[in-house]
Image (cartoon, rainbow, N blue to C red):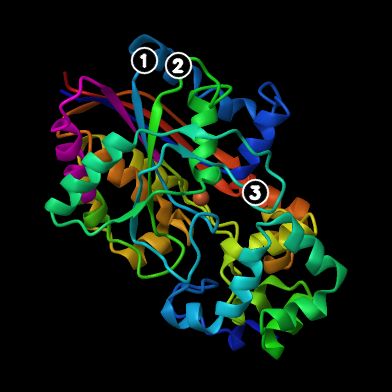
Amino acid sequence: MTASEFDHHTTIPGTTLFDGEQAMKGYQLNKMCYSFNVASARDEYLADPESYYDKFKLNEDQKRACRNKNVLEMIAAGGNIYYLAKFAGMFKLDVQDVGAQQTGITKEAFKEKLRKAGD
Amino acid sequence: MARIIGGLTSSHIPAVGNAIANELYEDPYWKPFFEGYPPVRDWLNDHKPDVAINIYNDHGLGFFLDKMPTFAIGAAHQYVNEDEGWGIPQLPPFPGDPKLSWHIIESMVADEFDITSCQELAVDHGFTVPMQLFWPGAPHNPDMPRTVPISANTVQHPIPTLNRALDFGKALRKAILSYPEDVKVVILGTGGLSHQLDGERAGFINKEFDLMCMEKIVTAPEELTKISRHELVEKAGAQGTEFLMWMMMRGALGDKVTALHQNYHIPISNTGAGTMLLECAA
Ligand SMILES: [Fe+2]
């Protein structure tokens, strides 16, 4: 999937505004991720992800994005980063792992980019 | 009568919760951040507020997209820090002040702010991390004030305007000052400053904009209301919209404040971290 395929809902580069349209599109995906606040739900998901996707009625795009653990694809499928962080957390991915993945650089390079913002 | 003695701002980054749990105060990465807090704690120790109004934004623990309040006010006896899913240590419950909560809710609605009242509200890192920074050991710090959490929506657009946030704070001030009990109140505004977690622009931080906001919020908060919400996303990053909490806090402090202390450090996690202590004119 290339960047041009994303509907960002804004003129700000690389930024998808999570508005009503995205909220409707991603409702089931976000609802699943919200469920991961509870430890037993995380265990249930990890034991059988495919059944868990069906339980929350994810569509094919959402399932594929989750299988790929691809955050940009999850956002394109309507995911909201605050809920997606709970998904990422199950795989011990922090916000810098997620940032590095979305920007296509290593975690070290991403952290260096953050540090440089202070110069 | 109740008095508002000052305002405190802090970023509320989850990684800080872990750094506190691991006592990384002297670690070179964390030191410049944690150094911003002792002067605020000294001031709190001198003044010992009875109540802390904690204005934060929920990140998908207390609220979901099924029902998303724009402004929610806690009205519970206590606030439970539930599991957020990604491993930040949970804290014991924080004591509330439901009598003050309902007074604020009555006054705000009479003032035509349509708020959501919450008799149960699970509080996340947005609420707990600043409490830990200002009152070490929270909630078991002996000086721990009672609390009223107030959460504003920054999860889903449309979010409130900066002007509405400042006006909310002004109405909150009116509510607190009309409370008949003799309590000392501090207002916390938590979140920000600039950061973006999502999209190809993840990692965006804007030092110049943050420093401008920290300056203007002291002397000219009205000027900041000219920033549109779209401009706020552009300049502060998608999650930098949490600056709205600072605006709500500022509105509650009245016209004249003195900035007694401030600290700004980049980066903590993905964020430009800002801390301020604003004292109200006596
Ligand atoms: Fe936040």
Q: Position of residue A104 (x, y in %)?
A: 73, 68
Q: Position of residue B80 (x, y in %)?
A: 54, 41
Mark 1 nearby-residue class (10 Å; few <14, some 14–19, many ≥20)? some
Residue B241 figure quarter? bottom left
Q: Which of the marked residues, 2 or 1, is nearer the chain's N terminus?
A: 1
- Label 3 SS: loop
User: Is B202 left or right of B57, judged from the image as shown?
Assistant: right
Amino acid of disc 3: Asp
Q: Which residue is mark 1?
A: B48
Which residues are the magenta region? B168-189
| On-image quarter of the N terminus of chain A | bottom right
Instruction: Give the residue at mark 3.
Output: B83
Ligand 1 within 8 angstroms of badge 2 C-beta: no
Residue A49 to residue B276: above or below = below
Extreme residue in the top direction: B46
Chain name for mark 2: B
Q: Quadrant of the C terminus of chain A?
A: top right
Q: Amino acid at mark 2?
A: Asp
Q: Which residue is mark 2?
A: B143
Residue at 47% over, 50% down: B194
Of A97 and B42, which appears nearest the observer?
Answer: B42
Q: Is residue B170 magenta?
A: yes
In the rendered image, the vertical position of residue A51 relative to residue B246, given as above or below: below
On the same chain, marks 3 and 1? The answer is yes
Tell me, for residue B191, which label it has, or none.
none
Chain letter of disc 1 in the image: B
Mark 3 or mark 1, earlier in chain? 1
Q: What's the distance in space between the residues labelled 3 and 1, CA to CA? A: 30 Å
CB within 8 Å, label 3 to label 2: no
Which circle's residue, 3 or 2, is located before the other in the chain? Answer: 3
Q: What amino acid type should be assigned to the residue bearing mark 1?
A: Lys
